[in-house]
Image (cartoon, rainbow, N blue to C red):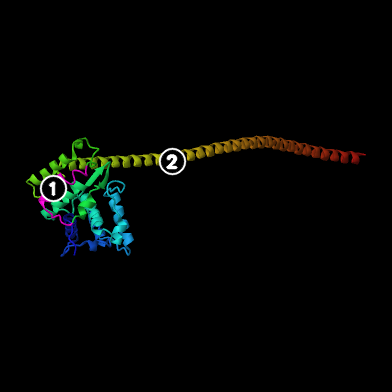
């Protein structure tokens, strides 16, 4: 079995503590992505991951977590090849990169997997994260010297390596780290010496906590908080804009309904006006017809009265005629 780099060993020890293994995890156990997926879901604080039948599905979920939640930018620094992991090419280095991004994500967020590590493992992880993990403009990327560091087979996990890495090999390759911060415009070599001096001389028994208390990482935490606040504000602004657009849409719909209602009311008023005019006209005609009917009825009564008078006169004349006839 080949000798592993001290940094790779430390990262594998971290995975072993997460997986609660009775034996140490080796690199080959991580190649199919199943164990890596368990680590990802542990960091997400979610239940056991679903069963994926193919390696491609597992690595798709892992890659999305690395890029979205760990904020890894593949366009900066050293690259990360998922194809090499699947093919087994330079396997220990490529998987170590993934593990380094995952452990750094936990360091900068909830620290839910870092409480049970041994001191030497913490020291090596602190060395890796402090020397090779960079941040710029909210993106995380890996220093270009990481491949060479992880490829060395003889580095023990020790305090001497931890201090040496900060003052020699990394000081010459990490000048692009956090260069957007006015705190680190001085020489990067001096910055790493300061950081590791603080970490090695502190009374704390946790090298990870020591490095997290350095100005470099405190500044990163502050920048992350500012980014989260900005994202939160942007989310609120988008939600507000969406609400405003929805309210405007509803107001437009209400205005359309009000316009239709007003139009219907006007049409109804017009119809009622026409109906009233027609009723008035009919009432006027009815009144005139009633007057005419009353006149006809009166005339009829007059005719009947005249007819009765005429009949009485005819009767009287007939009687007179009879009297005259008898006299004659």
Q: Label 2, label 1: how many angstroms apart (C-alpha)? A: 64 Å
Q: How many marks?
A: 2
Q: Position of residue 34 (x, y in %)?
A: 26, 62
**Above or below, comparing residue 283 to residue 118 in the picture:** above
Work out whether residue 283 can be spotted.
Answer: yes
Mark 2 and 1 residues: CB-CB less than 8 Å, in contact?
no
Q: Magenta region: which residues? A: 153-174
The quarter of the picture where residue 224 lies is: top left
Counting from the top left corner in percent of width and height, residue 89 is at: 28, 59
Q: Residue at x 22, y 52 (%)?
A: 148
Q: Is residue 125 left or right of residue 80?
A: left
Looking at this view, is 301 or 123 the one in front? 123
Element at label 1: helix
The residue under the point 13% across, 45% down is: 196
Residue topped by disc 2 = 249
Residue at image mark 1: 164
């Amino acid at each position: 079995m080949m000798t592993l780099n001290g940094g790779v060993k430390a990262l594998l020890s971290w995975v072993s503590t997460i997986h609660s293994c009775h034996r140490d995890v080796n690199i080959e156990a991580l190649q199919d992505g199943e164990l890596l997926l368990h680590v990802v879901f542990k960091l997400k604080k979610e239940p056991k991951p679903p069963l994926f039948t193919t390696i491609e599905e597992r690595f798709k979920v892992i890659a999305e977590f690395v890029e979205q939640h760990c904020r890894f930018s593949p366009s900066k620094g050293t690259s990360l090849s998922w194809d090499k992991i699947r093919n087994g090419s330079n396997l220990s280095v490529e998987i170590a990169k993934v593990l380094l991004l995952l452990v750094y994500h936990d360091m900068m967020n909830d620290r839910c997997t870092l409480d049970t590590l041994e001191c030497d493992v913490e020291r090596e992880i602190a060395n890796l994260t402090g020397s090779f993990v960079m941040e710029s403009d909210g993106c995380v990327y890996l220093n270009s010297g990481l491949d060479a560091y992880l490829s060395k087979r003889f580095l023990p996990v020790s305090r001497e390596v931890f201090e040496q890495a900060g003052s020699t090999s990394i000081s010459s390759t990490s000048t692009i780290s956090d260069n957007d911060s006015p705190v680190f415009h001085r020489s990067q070599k001096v910055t790493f010496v300061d950081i590791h001096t603080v970490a090695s001389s502190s009374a704390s028994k946790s090298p990870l906590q020591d490095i997290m208390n350095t100005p470099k990482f405190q500044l990163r935490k502050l920048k992350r908080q500012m980014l989260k606040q900005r994202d939160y504000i942007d989310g609120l602004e988008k939600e507000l804009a969406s609400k405003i657009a929805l309210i405007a849409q509803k107001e437009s719909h209400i205005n359309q309904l009000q316009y239709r209602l007003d139009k219907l009311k006007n049409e109804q008023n017009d119809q009622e006006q026409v109906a009233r005019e027609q009723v008035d006209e009919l009432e006027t005609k009815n009144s005139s017809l009633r007057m005419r009917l009353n006149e006809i009825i009166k005339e009829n009564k007059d005719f009947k009265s005249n007819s009765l008078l005429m009949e009485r006169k005819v009767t009287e004349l007939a009687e007179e005629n009879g009297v005259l006839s008898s006299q004659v």
